[in-house]
Image: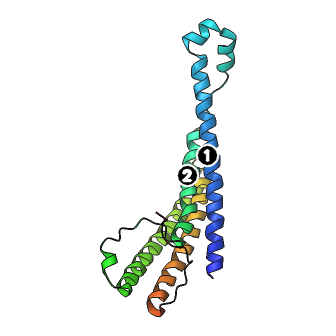
Amino acid sequence: MIKTMEWLARMMALAGGLVLTALVVLVCVSVAGRGLNTLGHSDFVTAFAPAVADMLKNFGPVKGDFEMVEAGIAFSIFAFLPICQLHGGHATVDIFTNLVPKTANRAIVAFWEVVLAGLLVLISWRLYEGLLSKMNNGETTFLLQFPIWWAYLASFIGSVAAAIVGVYCAIARILMLVTGRSHMPRTEGAVH
């Protein structure tokens, strides 16, 4: 089961990384286009190189760049949650928990895993309800006019993967608390 969770988490992280990379390229192209257009409208270029100014005025920002970034970032965040959860990469404050016995520490970790799994399931459910609502009312984005439910669907897919991995992690932590055997990957926590 751990291999399946690892595969799911890695595939989601890969998809999130590809989307995030595409968004970075999109933003860079949009900012460059906006900058070239601004340069084409500058008094200096217009006065000394009118042909260059006319050429630069043809550039501009990518239409709907903000809309695509909003939709893509939401998906990317959910896509990175499974791998972070599976490998214990979330930020922790363990100043006081290092002073308690290992069993108590395992109980604390299991408790918070269950809480996070519950929250991920709740988020997935609410995203599903939002997805249905957006599908039914036909709402679209302002500039690109793509249906808003597309962004909800992408986020919903990411949140379901995060919820599946979160529930697995909660069960694995409870089993670890009860049996003492780990059902989690060997690499856990952030590297400092």
Residue nearer the viewer, 108 or 98: 98
Q: CA distance from mark 1 to mark 2?
A: 8 Å
> Which secondary structure, mark 1?
helix
Quick check: 108 above or below 32? below
Q: Residue at x 60, y 12 (%)?
A: 45
Q: Which residue is mark 1?
A: 23
In this view, the residue farthest toward the bottom is 179
Residue nearer the viewer, 119 or 191: 191
- 127 sits left or right of 103 in the view: right
Residue 23: image location, x then y, percent: 61, 46
Q: Are marks 1 and 2 in contact (CB under 8 Å)?
A: yes
Give the residue type at disc 1.
Leu
Residue 149: image location, x then y, percent: 59, 55
Quick check: 168 above or below 45? below
Q: Which residue is mark 2?
A: 73
Residue nearer the viewer, 138 or 152: 152
Snapshot quadrant of residue 164: bottom right
